[in-house]
Amino acid sequence: MVVLSKPTSTSTSVQYSYSYIRNCKTTTFPIIIPVVDLSKPDAKTLIVNACDEFGFFKVINHGVPMDSISNLESEAVNFFSLPFHQKQQAGPPNPSGYGNKKIGVNGDVGWVEYLHLTNDQNYNSMRLSLAFGHNPHKFCCALSEYMCTVRKMGCEILDLMAEGLNTEQKNVLSKLVMDKESDSVFRLNHYPPCPPEMGLNNNGEDMVGFGEHTDPQIISLLRSNNTSGLQICLKDNKSWISVPPDHNSFFVNVGDCLQVMTNGRFKSVKHRVLANGLKSRLSMIYFCGPPLGKKITPLHSLMKGKQSLYKEFTWFEYKKSAYATRLADNRLRHFERIAAS
Ligand SMILES: C=C1C[C@]23C[C@@]1(O)CC[C@H]2[C@@]12CC[C@H](O)[C@@](C)(C(=O)O1)[C@H]2[C@@H]3C(=O)O
Ligand SMILES: O=C(O)CCC(=O)C(=O)O
Ligand SMILES: [Fe+2]
């Protein structure tokens, strides 16, 4: 495991208004997060069951080489260890670059700093070189190798999911991510240890690292170091469970786009990250997105004469509307069709 050993530098002079939440100690019964072994024949059934039940699962035997993961992790550690003013050279984070504390542009704040990266490796390289002040060759090689192998794993998962759903075409989902116009994004999140005087407020509530939200895309592929913090919300929409970290595995989230493509059968999972008082958390998330012009509609094979629960929209239209929302908002509400009585 790589931990940030060098002292990190974040902005300290600006006052932010952080959120705190009661870290409800979850449910009275233990919840086991589904584990899918990609090398086993029952993977497709387990994926569909996990998406039905949680919109979330863990993947083992994923085929992403450990070297590829640790190379990018150590490059990310180096980046986040740079002095704040240097990291800022790679900002702001739209569409790619460095961000600190502010998430999106609508007032959300978290105990996190991050790098937003896109599928365009030339653009990534240009942004990173502004921070490194020299050729960021090592970082960019590690990044493009990681993105390539993780995308491949994501497509394998999407093919198994499509098979498990008995769709007409096995690659109906993965082809959106393989498309050269795919609007996938990548994010490196660094949560520095939160100082004890800030970690809890007067009501004993925990500081939020990354506030509750659903991911907009099809699926998200998350890998983190061995630091806890990630929580998911159960289908009852009120119980939160902590996800035990596992640096050897990937975690998969169902996103809003997949919720629509399954006509609401799979629900995008609400999740959040709590700040950790002791250790830094480093997570790397590949968000599998469709091309901007793609119409997001339910898969034919799942409809069988049923009406779509959603109005027709393109990924571009969804994104435009989503980026005007706050993190915790329900971004699909705007696209729901009012059922005719
Ligand atoms: C508050 C926001 C940040 C976000 C864009 C948004 O307006 C609403 C969705 C947010 C989210 C959540 C998942 C990913 O981290 C992200 C990159 C995405 O695609 O949607 C972020 C956006 C962001 O940080 O810009
Ligand atoms: O950093 C994490 O572990 C999760 C962050 C997240 O949910 C996101 O960036 O969308
Ligand atoms: Fe997320």
Image: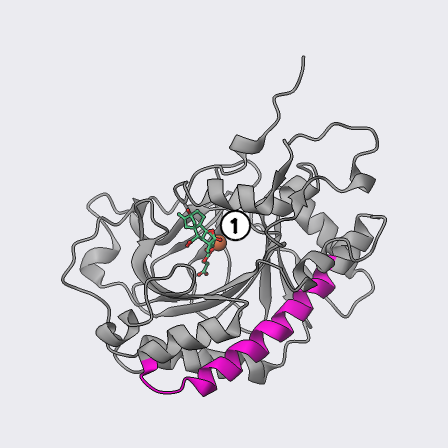
**Residue that appears at 34% across and 49% down:** 105
Q: Which three-letter amino acid code belongs to the residue tagged 1?
A: Asp
Residue 310 appears in which quarter of the rendering? top right
Instruction: Spot the residue most to the top.
Output: 341
User: Which of the two residues, 146 or 55, is positioned nearer the viewer here?
Assistant: 146
User: Which of the two residues, 73 or 169, is positioned nearer the viewer here?
Assistant: 169
Q: Disc 1 beta carbon < 8 A from ligand 3?
A: yes
**Residue that appears at 73% across and 65% down:** 156
Can residue 214 be seen here? The reply is yes
Q: Residue 226: say if magenta.
A: no
Against 330, is 167 above or below? below
Q: Residue 153: say if magenta.
A: yes
State the image coordinates of residue 85 (x, y, percent, origin top left): 22, 73
How was the colour assigned to the protein in this rendering?
one colour
Against 148, is 94 above or below? above
| Mark 1 lies on residue | 215
State the image coordinates of residue 33 (x, y, percent, origin top left): 60, 55
User: Which of the two residues, 339 or 247, is positioned nearer the viewer here?
Assistant: 339
Tag 1 secondary structure:
loop
Against 282, is 332 above or below? above
State the image coordinates of residue 293 (x, y, percent, origin top left): 62, 49
Can residue 225 be seen here? The reply is no
State the image coordinates of residue 8 (x, y, percent, origin top left): 26, 75
Magenta residues (range): 132-158
Instruction: Spot the residue most to the left.
Output: 13
Query: In the picture provided, is 248 more to the left or to the right than 42?
Result: left
**Residue that appears at 27% across and 63% down:** 194
**Residue that appears at 21% across and 57% down:** 198
